[in-house]
Image (cartoon, helix red, strand yellow):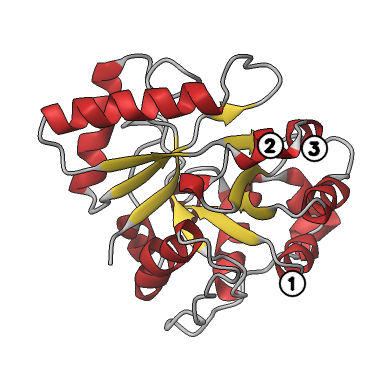
């Protein structure tokens, strides 16, 4: 089975990932060193980044794959996208269908990072009603999910899949994100772990090591192999990892709810 990273900003010069080819190649080398063999290139698709669409992403992915082959890098890329939630509801079904993860039926949609209007449940519901299968990107970093933790449970029960960011598990996005990320794993609400890598320092590649550091190493095969494989294969249901071997220690979310 292949370790896969389903959320990564690796394509050069498109969004806030690597600025040039050199940066992409350095990031790719770090993916290989960390044990990842397959990466889904997921540049941002949102209103303030015009021109990033499926044809451009596919062309950039192919070009980078050719460069990786020329450098004998043992890493394979497939196209995808990280689509802004509100923007996704404005795109037509054909456009959304072209932005899925590796050509699967699954669409990576970004959990809102702003603390604005509490409408994530409505917007995700609109996409689901249109027949799209949703992978929720990094809900552990979303103020809307922090204020309403059980929203994630409701969305998962309705068929959505949740992606937790590896770096969040070790505190890379602060204590609130770390607690919520741990709660997701303890409550079996995370299906895949991804790097959401943008570079090799502040937002680096790496999946298994952060899981191990956070005490969830036993879940690595599920979160880095079984879950990604099911999504990329187009499975209607993605396997849920078992409770952590460390005993499923409960993460206190009381303070999150009171915010």
Going from the N terminus, do you reach mark 2 or mark 1 first? 2
How crowded is the residue under tag 1: few (<14 C-alpha within 10 Å), some, or many (20+)? few
Mark 2 → mark 1, Cα distance in angstroms: 26 Å
How crowded is the residue under tag 3: few (<14 C-alpha within 10 Å), some, or many (20+)? some
How crowded is the residue under tag 2: few (<14 C-alpha within 10 Å), some, or many (20+)? few
Please indicate whether residue 259 sits to the left or right of residue 65 in the image: right
Going from the N terminus, do you reach mark 3 or mark 1 first? 3
Tag 2 near tag 1, CB within 8 Å: no
Instruction: Kindly tell me whether residue 112 is visible in this rendering.
Output: yes
Residue at the disc numbered 2: 94
The percent position of residue 109, horizontal first and vertical second, equals: 65, 44
Q: Residue 63's quadrant in the figure?
A: top left
Q: Nearer the viewer, residue 199 or 43?
A: 43
Q: Is residue 100 above or below residue 249?
A: above
Classify the position of the N terminus by image quarter.
bottom left
Q: Secondary structure at mark 1?
A: helix
Which of discs 2 and 1 lies nearer the camera? The answer is 2
Q: Nearer the viewer, residue 75 or 152?
A: 75
Q: Is residue 46 above or below residue 181?
A: above
Which of discs 3 and 2 lies nearer the camera? The answer is 2
Q: Residue 117's quadrant in the figure?
A: top right
Q: Residue 12's quadrant in the figure?
A: top left
Please indicate whether residue 35 sits to the left or right of residue 102 in the image: left
Residue at the disc numbered 3: 89
Find residue 157 and name its label: 1
Q: Secondary structure at mark 2?
A: helix
Please indicate whether residue 200 sits to the left or right of residue 138 in the image: left
């Amino acid at each position: 089975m292949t370790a896969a990273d389903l959320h990564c900003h690796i394509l050069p010069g498109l969004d806030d990932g690597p600025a040039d080819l050199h940066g992409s190649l350095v990031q790719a080398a770090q993916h290989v060193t960390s044990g990842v063999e397959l990466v889904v290139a997921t540049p941002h698709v949102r209103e303030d980044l015009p021109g990033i669409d499926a044809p451009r992403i596919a062309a950039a992915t192919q070009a980078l794959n050719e460069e990786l082959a020329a450098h004998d890098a043992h890493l394979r890329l497939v196209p995808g996208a990280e689509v802004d939630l509100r923007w996704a509801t404005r795109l037509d079904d054909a456009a959304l269908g072209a932005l899925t993860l590796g050509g699967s039926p699954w669409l990576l949609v970004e959990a809102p990072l702003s603390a604005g209007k509490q409408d994530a449940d409505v917007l995700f519901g609109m996409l689901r009603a249109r027949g799209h299968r949703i992978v929720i990107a990094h809900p552990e970093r979303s103020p809307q999910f922090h204020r309403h933790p059980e929203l994630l449970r409701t969305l998962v029960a309705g068929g959505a899949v949740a992606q937790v960011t590896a770096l969040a598990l070790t505190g890379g996005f602060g204590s609130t994100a770390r607690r919520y990320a741990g709660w997701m794993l303890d409550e079996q609400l995370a299906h895949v772990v991804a790097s959401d890598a943008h570079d090799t320092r502040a937002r680096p590649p790496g999946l298994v090591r952060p899981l191990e550091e956070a005490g969830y190493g036993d879940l690595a095969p599920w979160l880095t192999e079984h879950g990604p494989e099911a999504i990329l294969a187009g499975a209607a249901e993605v396997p849920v990892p078992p409770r952590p071997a460390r005993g499923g220690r409960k993460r206190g979310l009381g303070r999150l709810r009171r915010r």
